[in-house]
Image (spheres, coloured by chain):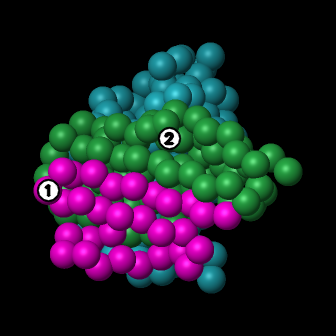
Amino acid sequence: QQPVQSPQAVILREGEDAVINCSSSKALYSVHWYRQKHGEAPVFLMILLKGGEQKGHEKISASFNEKKQQSSLYLTASQLSYSGTYFCGTDNNNDMRFGAGTRLTVKP
Amino acid sequence: NAGVTQTPKFQVLKTGQSMTLQCAQDMNHEYMSWYRQDPGMGLRLIHYSVGAGITDQGEVPNGYNVSRSTTEDFPLRLLSAAPSQTSVYFCASSYAGSRDGYTFGSGTRLTVV
């Protein structure tokens, strides 16, 4: 069961903020966030663990609501380099499923 | 430090042919996995392994086999290629528990004609 991401796409101007949401129907061990640029491999951004521990990117933040099985990725003061497709991954005991992705475009 | 190395980068197969996609990592990661990526569908898990000698099925395992004889290598075998297996394939690895996230290979773009 893949997690559901929203929105599917978002267009921003440099300096604007964005929120990407991820929800799962299953209880989660952790939530991962990745960014993929066109033609490249996904790159790890952040992990959120049950109990509140977080590890990841210094300029990107995220939240994890364990009871609701939801996570949100917060991109603030966006830069051109933030453009790409963002995926959340939900880890259920080594079985990692990814959402369909959110395409983020940052324009000058 | 090479990370996760996938070969080949591109491959064209005829329907019914078999082949093996190679994946090797030099980070001593216990966990390795294979994903396929199709437009609009994100990454779908094919098979994964939590250590040498241990493999398990993911979301879309049909038509694919894996084995894990060493910590470093996790090859993916297509038994009889079908056009529906045209996709980009990614191998990923991590330490057990994946607390540091997955490291992905650069991918193999496979076309089955």
Residue A73 on the magenta span? yes
Between marks 1 and 2, how big is the CA–CA gap?
Answer: 23 Å
Relative to A12, is A21 on the left or the right?
A: left
Q: Quadrant of the N terminus of chain A?
A: top left
Identify the element where label 2 is drawn.
loop
Decide: few, some or many residues near mark 2? Use Cα within 10 Å; few <14, some 14-19, many ≥20.
many
* Rendering coords of residue B1 (x, y %): 62, 83
Q: Quadrant of residue B97?
A: bottom left
The residue at 66%/29% (across/down) is B12
Relative to A86, is B101 on the left or the right?
A: left
The chain letter corresponding to green is A
The residue at 40%/31% (across/down) is B79
Q: Residue type at mark 2? A: Gly
Residue labelled with disc 1: A67
Residue labelled with disc 2: A101
The chain letter corresponding to cyan is B
Magenta residues, start to end? A48-77
* Rendering coords of residue B95 (x, y %): 35, 76
Q: Do the residues under discs 1 and 2 have CB atoms within 8 angstroms?
A: no
Q: Give whichever of B18, B82 is nearer the camera.
A: B82
Picture layout, residue A102 above or below residue A60: above
* Rendering coords of residue A49 (x, y %): 27, 71
Q: Residue furthest front?
A: A16
Specify whether disc 1 shares its chain with disc 2: yes
Q: The disc numbered 1 marks a residue on which chain?
A: A
Q: Does residue A60 appear in this view?
A: yes
Q: Residue type at mark 1? A: Lys
The residue at 25%/75% (across/down) is A52
Q: The disc numbered 2 marks a residue on which chain?
A: A
